[in-house]
Each structure stands twice: as C-alpha cells, then as structure tokens.
Image (spheres, rainbow, N blue to C red):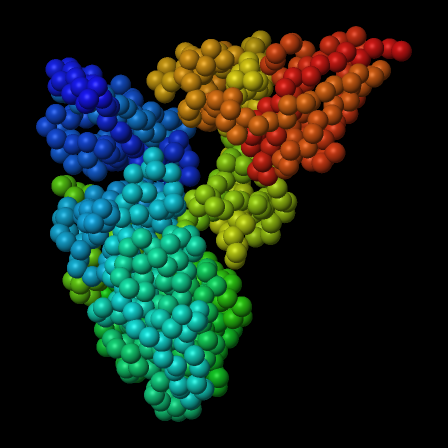
C-alpha cells in the first residue's frame, strides 16, 4: 500500500512540475567527410557553394535549427521539418589550408534545451581531385535525402522505391536501393560504423530492406557441355534470388552486401532461408543461383551459344544482363571467397567468343549485333572477361574472345560523337560497366585485379589515355578527351531546388535512376569494397628553395574501412614511374627551380590487398617564400601525463635567414599562433610549444580540431617584394581521454639511469610499432624529439648529453604510420663525471 502511495505521489508531482524539469536536449549529428575520422574537414575551394549537412533526433514546429558558418557571415535558421535533413548552402572564401568550423544547433523552443555539433570545411586549391571529393560529398547527401524511412515490426527500414526529393534516385526496383546503399559503403559509410555518422543509419536501414527482396529455391545441379556439377557452394541446399528480373538485379544486391565488409554479420530481416543467416551465406546462395541459371544450351565449338544469363534461368543470354552476373560473382569470389565452380567461367568464355565481333572487337547483345549500340554491350564483355581471367595479352580458346580488341575499340572511339549510341561517356549504363572492367581487370586468372590506368589501342597512331583523370578541357567545356572524372563532375546537377544528383545520361528513362549511385562509385574508383585506402601526402616545406631538404609525410593516409589499415607507403621521387623509397616518411631535394610531382602509393592489409596513389606537386622557387606550418599530431592527452603541450617546432621557413640585398634582417618565423576553439582568431595559445593543459582540461574528454598559424618577416626582410609578412596554417586533432580509457594504457615504467656522458632509458615493450624518444631540460616539459626506436627490448641509450645537466624524458608509443598513440611517465637523470 505504501509503495502505491509513493507511485501516486510521484505521478502527481511529475504532472505539476514544468516540462523543463524532464527536458532532454536533442541529439544533433553532422555528416563527416571521412567515415573513420569525424573531424576530417569537407573539401571546398574559394567561391564554391557547398551544402552543410546535419540531422537531429527530433522535428516539429518547436524545434528550430541554426547554422553558424564559422566565417563571420550571417547565420541561417529555420524549423526542423525533417529531422534527417537539416541543410544549408554556403559559399566560403579564403586561403587554401584554412579550416572553418561551422556549427549546427538545434533547440527545443518549448523547453529551451539545445545541442550543437561542429561541421568542418577546409579550403583547398581547386583541382580535379578536390572537385571529385565535393561531387561525391554532394551526391551522397542527395541519396541520403531521398531515402524513404519506415518502421515495421519494430525494425527500421529504408528504401529508394518511391518518389522523393525530385525522384532522381528513386524507383520501384530492388537494384536501385542496392546501388544507392553501395554508393555509401564504398566511401566507408558502413552499417558497422560510428553511430555519430548519420549515414550509418541510412545504410543500416537500406541493408535491412535489401534482405527482404530475396526469395529461395532448392539448389539443382547444372549440366553443360563441360560437365555436370553441383551449384551448392555451402552445402545448405538453398539458392537465393530477387523476385523479378533476378539476373539483372541480383548482382547489384550482391555488391551491396559484400560492400558491407562484414561477412559474419547475421541478417535480422528477410523471409525463410534469409533471416538469421550470415551475410556471406546469403551471398553464397546468390552465387549458387547464378551458377544454376547460366544458359546450358549450345556447343563448345562453333556455332557456340551457351554460357551467359538473361531474364530467366537457363535462357538464351544477352550481354546486358551478363554484366550484372559478372560483377556480383567477382565481388563474391574475390572479396569473400565464395565458391563458384570453374566450369561456370569456362562456359562463359564460350558465350563471349560467340558474341564478340572478331574484326571490330565489339560485343553484341544476343549475338554479335549490339542493337542499342556498342557501349551497352562491349563494356559488358570486358567485365565478363575480367571475371573469367582474360585480360591484356590473353584470349580465350582459338583467340576468342579478345580483351585487346575490345579495349582497342573503346580507345579508338573514346569520346567520338555524342549520345548513348556513339559516345560511352554519354551512356552511364555502359560507362559503369567499363569502369568496372578497368578496375577489375585480371590478366592471369588468379583472382587478383591488375587495374588499368591508361586505356590503350593497338591501332597505330592512337596514344594511351588516362581513362579516369584525363582533362582535355576546362570545367565548362565538354572536350572529347576528358576522362571519366571530369565528365562526371561536369554532368552533376547543381541547381535548385534539388542538388547533387545525375540524370538523363542513358538510353532509357528506367536507367536514369541508377545514375547518381553509379556516378559516385565511378568517381570513387571502387565498386564493392567496404571503403578504400586513401593516400594523403604532404611536403614540408612547400614551396621550397633550391637545394633544400624537403620532408615528405604520408602518415595522414587512412582507410575508409575501420577494419583495415595502411601498412605500406611507397614514394616515386623523380616521376619516372618507379617507386624509390618506402615508409610513411621520406626526404628529397631538388637542384633547380621548377614544379616537381611526387607520387605516393599506399597499400592496405586487406585480403586481397588494395592500393591507391596520389601526387603532390612541390614548387621550388626563389625567395621570398611563405613558411610551411606543421601542427604535428594527432595528440593523445591523458590526465596521468599532464602537462599537455602542442608542438609546432616542425614548421619550416624555406628562406630562413635570407633577405634582399642591403642591411635588412634575415627572414624568420616571428610568430606561432594557435586556434583551439574553431574561431579562426588564432589567439588561444602562442609559441612553438604552448602549454594547453588548462584549456583542454576544461574541455574534458572528446576530440577537437586545432589550427596553427605561422607568420614570417617577409615585409621587413624583402620590402621591395611588395609582400606583407607571409603566413601558413595547418590543422591537427587533439584527443582528450579519461585516465581510465584504454587509450591511456601507456608505458608507465620508464626509467632513466645516468652514466658519464650518457643516459640509459628502459621500459616495458607494449607491442607498439615503434617508440619516439623525447627529451627536455625542464621538469614537466616541453620536450623535443631526439630519436625513434623499433627495439622490442625497449631500451635507448642517449649519448648526446652533458655531464652535470638534469634531463627529463618521455617515451611515446607510435603506430606503423608514425602517429603517436600516448605518452609515458616522465623519467629523469643527471650524468656526472666519475
């Protein structure tokens, strides 16, 4: 009875109390550019209008949003009508390297509760790669906005089956939803990702819907002229397929599931023989469907006929449907090791031999006649050859099919004419298949891709072309020698009211709905991988002067898939196509003025491995030259290793000490100014190694973007140049952890033992890739880097000390890329003469 009275009293009090007592602030999220690094800024260039993108967990008339752009311009506000789409468009201006910190705030006007989230934007020099990044960024947001979300049976679903936001990526077919999900996944936005990323929910909802599209049948053995074989790759007696046009659509569903990167994940949706199965088993059962459905009629020798796919199982093939079978089977077998009987590939070679024109290299539709034009079917033949292991210099039996003939046709006719029938770049259906073939090319049949960068021809006088990055025009033109990237960037719709999609670059309207997802994947240069490695290179200094040692740093390279890491860095220092040195860092010097391209290739630890490249141009010029800021980091701050310092000592002034003729002071860096709160005021800390303990202690655990601005004395050292003092900015990240966080499990037993003229350091090996040794002469720091060691004996001898001086040491564990993980306890010693 007493308990009931207490409950009644609580309810009465709760009713009488104002709503603000129980108010809960909204949950605000902003879209990250890098899925694995929520602080990595979005790219833009000065004068470019972009979309700032955020979400909330609440909507309605009493929820108001405000976007503060972080550049001093007028904020924009409005009512949160759709909690999944809180956007604003803005044009930034500023020097390359500047990072703006925008903020999205959502307030419940009924309770006064509010919450905010930062959104970072970095100014870049305009280039094709930056334009591509912006195009992908805008395209993904359009897909996110266009998803229809619903909850059924307590499960959150999402699809693109019904009209929304212009309907440019929505259509009532399973493959549209699958393609759109795939576009997010190949950019690292995964169902298994950080829930602070709004796209994680978008992808999770989409995958849940994808599994409901599947139906099952019992497996049946297959017979063709090469033999009879089981089509049950995992022994469960099941094959899975979509309900309609299953051999067109199934491959796209397979790609989306494989691109999740989680073969052992278990389905929580779907019908019988789908629900409760691992993603890999689902894909294997779809492989089994394709193995069974391959047309088994025809002969091995002329007139051929068998070996492909169409609308129904064991139906006379067409090369339009066959490409979707190939891409799904490549994804399943190469990425997840699903089982496909080799007879399937052997029999497909027979179909390709039958359907390729032996003189032109063109692949036909249901025979050697292309019907809709050569670009719907010839790229399909190429991607099927990639599946079968027929690449450059290789052919099938009796010289058929031929990769080289098909590639020659594509190069000879690259950009010739206009319209889908005459120009591959005007026909995304075929262009997507072409890009797949170039990326998945496998000349030796080992299942490992040897991607093709330069599209080439065997026709005399036709030079190779970089099919992706070639630019034969300015952004406003449509030159025939533009590659895929420039073509897609120029084609993207950036008007109002809808923004960021692609449309009307196909033969029929039913193909238009795929364009946005396919364009994003083509720009990303990947089809079914759960994110890719991304190469990031920096030269310090840049610009530089003749004869200067330039430090190259690739440690900021990253992987879009959190389950994978970069484990190899290779540098081509002289632009000869040969990689000269390895490791996350390198150095180079140039003896003459000019602009020097340096290539970095990074490779991940996937199976199979995946690589990517980037080029940085180093300018070697004459003074006066701006300094290059180096903010170091990322920093890991743990309470047990206070005080905390930032370190800008790596900043370099290329023309240090130089001046124009006459009695002028030598140029030097005169100031180090830090912006710690995103205000761009650079007034929060000063000096090359400022103590920021108080600032970040007050902030508490979290991750924070900071910027360093270094300024030289050009105005007084080179007055006749007409320049003012030159500056440069650099950004980095500070991670503040609680003392109990596993990230703070650092070396905690560093000891220092003094000898005459030397100090021996000893600690316990923690498994770090290496250790950076720091030394100072002030108790508590700051410290300067003196050495790196990979010794697993965890010892270092410092022989560069002076007797009678007390030295203070810390050791910082470092990852394979050189990023420091955390700092040890401090140890000290004073060497003396014995």
Residue 633, visible in the rendered structure: no
The answer to whether residue 414 is left or right of residue 686 is left
* Rendered position, 164 above or below 271: above
Please say if 344 is above or below 336: below
> For this rendering, which residue is in front, 703 or 788?
703
- The part of the image, by quadrant, that contains residue 748 is top right
**Residue under the image location 44 percent in, 49 percent down:** 532
* Residue 607 visible in the shown view: yes
Estimate the x, y position of residue 488 in percent, counting from the top left: 29, 52
| Residue 594 in the image: above or below residue 210 | above
Which quarter of the rendered picture does the C terminus lie within?
top right
Q: Residue at x 27, y 29 (%)?
A: 28
Q: Nearer the viewer, residue 561 or 578?
A: 561
Using residue 704 as the reference point, say whether residue 819 is left or right of it. right
The residue most toward the right is 834
Farthest residue to the left: give it. 61
Q: Residue at x 40, y 63 (%)?
A: 281
Question: Residue at the spot x=40%, y=86% of the render?
Answer: 224
- Tell me where residue 245 appears, x and y as whole percent: 23, 70
**Residue extending farthest front:** 1
Q: Residue 27 appears in which quarter of the rendering?
A: top left
Q: Looking at the image, how many numbered discs can be counted on the residues? A: 0
Q: 152 or 718: nearer the eye? A: 152
Q: Residue 71: x percent and y percent?
A: 29, 21
Q: Is residue 590 left or right of residue 318?
A: right
Image quadrant holding the N terminus, namely top left
Point out residue 548 in the picture as x, y percentages from the top left corner. 62, 30
Work out whether residue 287 or residue 183 is closer to the camera in this orientation and state it: 287
């Amino acid at each position: 009875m007493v308990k009931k009275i207490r409950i009644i009293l609580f309810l009465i009090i709760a009713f009488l109390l104002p709503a603000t007592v129980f108010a809960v602030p909204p949950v605000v999220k902003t879209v990250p550019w890098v899925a694995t690094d929520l602080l990595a800024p979005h790219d833009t260039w000065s004068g470019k209008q972009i979309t700032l993108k955020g979400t909330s967990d609440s909507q309605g008339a009493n929820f108001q949003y405000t976007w503060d752009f972080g550049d001093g311009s007028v904020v924009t506000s409005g009512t949160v009508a759709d909690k999944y789409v809180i956007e604003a468009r803005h044009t930034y201006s500023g020097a390359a390297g500047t990072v703006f910190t925008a903020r999205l705030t959502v307030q419940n006007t009924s309770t006064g509760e509010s919450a905010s989230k930062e959104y970072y934007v970095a100014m870049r020099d305009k280039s094709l790669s930056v334009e591509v990044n912006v195009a992908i960024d805008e395209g993904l947001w359009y897909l996110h906005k266009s998803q229809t979300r619903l909850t059924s049976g307590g499960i959150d679903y999402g699809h693109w089956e019904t009209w929304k936001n212009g309907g440019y990526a929505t259509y009532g077919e399973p493959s549209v939803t699958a393609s759109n999900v795939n576009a997010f996944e190949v950019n690292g936005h995964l169902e298994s990702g950080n829930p602070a990323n709004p796209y994680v929910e978008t992808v999770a909802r989409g995958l849940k819907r994808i599994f409901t599209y599947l139906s099952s049948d019992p497996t049946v053995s297959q017979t063709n002229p090469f033999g009879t074989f089981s089509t049950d790759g995992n022994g469960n007696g099941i094959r899975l397929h979509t309900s309609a046009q299953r051999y067109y659509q199934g491959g796209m569903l397979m790609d989306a599931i494989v691109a999740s990167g989680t073969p052992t994940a278990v389905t929580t949706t779907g019908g019988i023989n789908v629900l409760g199965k691992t993603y890999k088993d689902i894909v294997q059962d779809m492989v089994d469907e394709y193995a069974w459905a391959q047309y088994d009629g025809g002969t091995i020798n002329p007139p051929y006929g068998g070996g492909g796919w169409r609308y129904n199982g064991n139906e006379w093939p067409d090369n339009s449907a066959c490409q979707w079978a190939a891409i799904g089977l490549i994804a399943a077998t190469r990425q997840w090791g699903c089982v496909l009987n080799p007879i399937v590939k052997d029999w497909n070679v027979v179909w390709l031999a039958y359907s390729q024109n032996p003189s032109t290299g063109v692949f036909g539709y249901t025979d050697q006649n292309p019907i809709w034009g050569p670009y719907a079917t010839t790229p399909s033949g190429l991607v099927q050859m990639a599946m079968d292991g027929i690449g450059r210099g290789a052919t099938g039996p009796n010289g058929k099919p031929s990769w080289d003939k098909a590639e020659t046709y594509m190069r000879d006719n690259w950009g010739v004419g206009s319209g889908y029938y005459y120009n591959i770049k005007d026909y995304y259906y075929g262009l997507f298949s072409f890009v797949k073939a170039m990326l998945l090319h496998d000349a030796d049949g080992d299942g490992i891709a040897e991607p093709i960068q330069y599209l080439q021809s065997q026709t005399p006088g036709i030079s190779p072309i970089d099919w992706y990055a070639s630019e034969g025009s300015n952004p406003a033109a449509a030159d025939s020698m533009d590659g895929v990237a420039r073509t897609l960037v120029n084609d993207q719709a950036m008007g109002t009211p809808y923004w960021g999609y692609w449309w009307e670059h196909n033969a029929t309207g039913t193909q238009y709905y795929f364009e946005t997802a396919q364009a994003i994947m083509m720009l990303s240069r990947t089809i079914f991988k759960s994110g890719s490695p991304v190469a990031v290179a920096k030269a310090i200094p840049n610009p530089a002067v003749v004869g200067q040692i330039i430090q190259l740093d690739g440690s900021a390279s990253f992987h879009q898939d959190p389950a994978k890491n970069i484990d190899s860095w290779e540098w081509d220092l002289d632009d000869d196509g040969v990689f000269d040195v390895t490791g996350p860092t390198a150095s180079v010097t140039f003896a003459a003025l000019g602009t020097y391209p340096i290539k970095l290739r990074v490779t991940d630890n996937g199976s199979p491995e995946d690589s990517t490249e980037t080029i940085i141009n180093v300018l070697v010029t004459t003074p006066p030259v701006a300094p290059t800021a180096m903010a170091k980091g990322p920093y890991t701050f743990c309470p047990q290793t206070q005080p905390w310092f930032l370190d800008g000592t790596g900043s370099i002034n290329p023309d240090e000490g130089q001046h124009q003729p006459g009695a002028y002071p030598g140029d030097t860096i005169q100031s180090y100014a830090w912006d710690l709160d995103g205000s761009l005021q650079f007034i929060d800390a000063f000096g090359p190694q400022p103590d920021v303990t108080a600032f970040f202690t007050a902030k508490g655990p979290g991750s924070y973007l900071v910027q360093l601005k270094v300024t030289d004395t050009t105005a007084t050292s080179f007055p006749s140049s007409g320049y003012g003092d030159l500056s440069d900015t650099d950004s980095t990240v500070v991670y503040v952890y609680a003392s109990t966080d596993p990230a703070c499990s650092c070396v905690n037993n560093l000891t220092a033992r003094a000898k005459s003229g030397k100090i021996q350091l000893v600690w316990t090996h923690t498994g770090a890739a290496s250790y950076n040794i720091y030394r100072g002469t002030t108790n508590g720091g700051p410290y300067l880097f003196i050495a790196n060691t990979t010794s697993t004996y965890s010892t270092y001898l410092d022989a560069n000390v002076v007797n009678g001086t007390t030295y203070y040491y810390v050791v910082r564990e470092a990852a394979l890329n050189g990023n420091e993980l955390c700092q040890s306890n401090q140890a000290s010693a004073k060497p003396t003469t014995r």
